Image: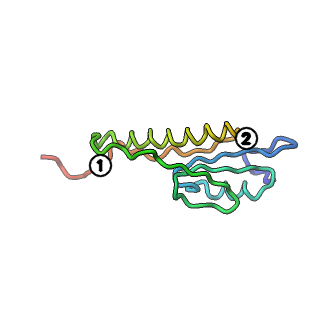
Amino acid sequence: MNQNLPPMLQCAAGRKTRVLFIHQNFPGQFRRIAMQLARDPAYEILAVGKQGCPQLAGVRTLTYQLHREPAPAAHQYARPYEAGILHGQAVLRLLQKLKANGFVPDVIVARDGVRRCSPRTSTRRQS
């Protein structure tokens, strides 16, 4: 085992440490740590990503899909928030199934996405 890992990722004696990665486009910025942990037999690695996300060798990846897209009639500034809620709901449903099947992670590493102050930015002066 790599002793350079943070204490929260150190294995408990006698059992695998379960690590769950959550990233819409897994592996994203978690590629290196996920690969490192996947090579170590002391860890059980599972990832959750949106359907179509890239796969990573050695990491079991479960995917979700949105049950609908954000409403086109919603205000343009509200659509990113609605999209975030829809992704959260889809991930929650998948996590509830995992728990019902007995998978309870020891560590969760997640990325919540990037939200800007507004959906559009412009340097053009409004008249």
Please say which color scheme the image uses: rainbow
Q: Which residue type carries mark 2?
A: Met
Query: Dot 1 lies on which element?
Result: loop
Compared to residue 28, the image places residue 66 above or below, namely: above
Image spot of residue 43 (x, y percent): 76, 50
Q: Which residue is mark 1?
A: 120
In this rendering, position of residue 54 left or right of residue 1? left
Callout 2: 10 Å neighbours few (<14), some, many (20+)?
A: few
Callout 1: 10 Å neighbours few (<14), some, many (20+)?
A: few
Q: Which residue type carries mark 1?
A: Arg
Extreme-right residue of the structure: 14
Q: Which residue is mark 2?
A: 8
- What residue is rendered at 56% in x and 61% in y? 54
Query: Dot 2 lies on which element?
Result: helix
- What residue is rendered at 67% in x and 55% in y? 60
Look at the image and tell me whether residue 106 can be seen: no
Which labelled disc corresponds to residue 50?
Answer: none
Between the residue at mark 2 and the residue at mark 1, the CA separation in whole angstroms equals 39 Å
- What residue is rendered at 58% in x and 44% in y? 110
Extreme-bottom residue of the structure: 57
In this rendering, position of residue 29 left or right of residue 82? right
- What residue is rendered at 50% in x and 38% in y? 89
Image spot of residue 67 (x, y percent): 45, 45
Circles 2 and 1, Cβ within 8 Å, touching? The answer is no
Q: Earlier in the sequence, mark 2 or mark 1?
A: 2
Compared to residue 54, the image places residue 114 above or below, namely: above
In this rendering, position of residue 70 left or right of residue 16? left
Image spot of residue 103 (x, y percent): 71, 41
Image spot of residue 104 (x, y percent): 70, 38
Look at the image and tell me whether residue 67 can be seen: yes
